[in-house]
Image (cartoon, rainbow, N blue to C red):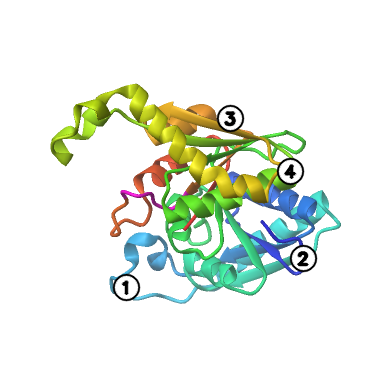
């Protein structure tokens, strides 16, 4: 959400569940305060093609029947009406797709003016109830724009002043996450907490071979993590001088460090995979675990 032009859009997927309603309300609020448009997407694609595990396998899709189309249309109309009632000044568009939910949202994410894609993390099992956990994971791994996932427990909290919590590890997705986090904190004039987590090297000694004894010292490891974090923040501090930054160097697993620091009102921002990610996985272990453990919104950048 780093554009302010009226032609830019917040994309949100809806499926009729409470989770997607919360995502809709959150998205409408974000679009309203930033002067963006809201584009609401529903999918009536075949049940056989829903989910990430179907990719690469042969399935015989069936076209949506009349009941599928009516359900998806009704959900879409209700969602647009609900958003308009909450924020009547919003420019709202709707999109009904016959594709898989992930593909429907990716189509919108690659369209001109797309700013961010928002989904809920839980839904029902069914043809139109498809913007759920696995969809959020695949979407975050493939989307060209930031993806924000809201957990099932999260409710829209207008007026709550949250912070931006960003996890940094020196990787390219981490640098993109940092840029997005700074722009969010700057716009909302809120605190940015930059988290760098480190763990004792003794935990990795067996896998990495001999390690010089001085590197087992926790003070040395913590100082190295602190210096690396300061270097990563250097240029961003200069480009966003008004942002209040709290560097946080923590002796913990990155997932633990992020989840323990964040509250449900905070936005957690992470890269899709870190320095040690396996390319065969859709998401890195940290971003995947944060998605499943967060109580507030999570933004993922690739």
For this view, does 56 lie left or right of residue 159?
Answer: left
* Distance from the alpha carbon under mark 3 to that under mark 2: 30 Å
Q: Is residue 173 above or below residue 266?
A: below
Residue where numbered disc 4 is placed? 188
* Distance between the alpha carbons at the discs numbered 3 and 4: 17 Å
Q: Is residue 42 visible?
A: yes
- CA separation in Å, label 2 and label 4: 17 Å
State the SS at label 2.
loop
User: Which mark identifies residue 59?
Assistant: 1
Q: Which residue is mark 2?
A: 5
Q: Position of residue 114 (x, y in %)?
A: 64, 67
- Find out whether the residues at labels 2 and 4 contact each other: C-beta distance under 8 Å: no
Query: Label 3, on which residue?
Result: 263
Instruction: Name, please, the residue furthest toward the right.
Output: 89
Q: Residue at x 56, y 62 (%)?
A: 145
* Residue in view at x 54 percent, y 34 percent: 295
The span shown in magenta is 271-276
Sequence order check: which comes first, mark 3 or mark 2? Answer: 2
Query: Which tag, 1 or 2, sits closer to the chain's start?
Result: 2
Depth check, front residue: 88 or 167: 167
**Nearer to us: label 3 or label 2:** 2
CA separation in Å, label 1 and label 3: 42 Å
Residue at 67 percent across and 57 percent down: it is: 2
């Amino acid at each position: 959400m780093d554009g302010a032009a009226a032609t830019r859009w917040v994309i949100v997927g809806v499926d009729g569940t409470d989770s997607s309603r919360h995502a809709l309300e959150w998205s409408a609020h974000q679009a309203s305060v930033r002067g963006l448009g809201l584009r609401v997407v529903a999918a009536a694609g075949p049940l056989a093609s829903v989910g990430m595990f179907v990719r690469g396998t042969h399935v015989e899709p069936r076209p949506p029947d009349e009941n599928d189309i009516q359900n998806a249309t009704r959900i879409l109309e209700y969602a647009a009406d609900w958003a308009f009632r909450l924020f009547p000044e919003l420019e709202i568009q709707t999109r009904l797709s016959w594709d898989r939910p992930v593909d429907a949202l990716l189509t919108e994410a690659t369209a001109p003016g797309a700013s961010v894609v928002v989904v809920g993390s839980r839904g029902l099992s069914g043809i139109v109830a498809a913007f759920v956990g696995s969809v959020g994971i695949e979407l975050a791994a493939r989307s060209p724009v930031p993806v924000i996932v809201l957990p099932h427990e999260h409710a829209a909290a207008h007026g709550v002043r949250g912070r931006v919590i960003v996890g940094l590890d020196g990787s390219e997705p981490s640098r993109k996450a940092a840029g997005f986090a700074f722009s969010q904190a700057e716009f909302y004039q809120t605190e940015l907490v930059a988290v760098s987590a480190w763990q004792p090297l003794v935990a990795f000694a067996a896998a990495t071979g001999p390690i010089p004894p001085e590197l087992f010292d926790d003070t040395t490891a913590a100082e190295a993590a602190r210096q690396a974090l300061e270097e990563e923040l250097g240029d961003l501090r200069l480009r966003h001088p008004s942002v209040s930054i709290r560097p946080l160097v923590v002796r913990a697993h990155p997932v633990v460090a992020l989840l323990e620091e964040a509250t449900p009102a905070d936005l957690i921002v992470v890269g899709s995979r870190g320095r040690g990610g396996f390319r065969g996985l859709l998401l890195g272990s940290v971003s995947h675990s944060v998605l499943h453990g967060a109580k507030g919104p999570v933004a993922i950048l690739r």
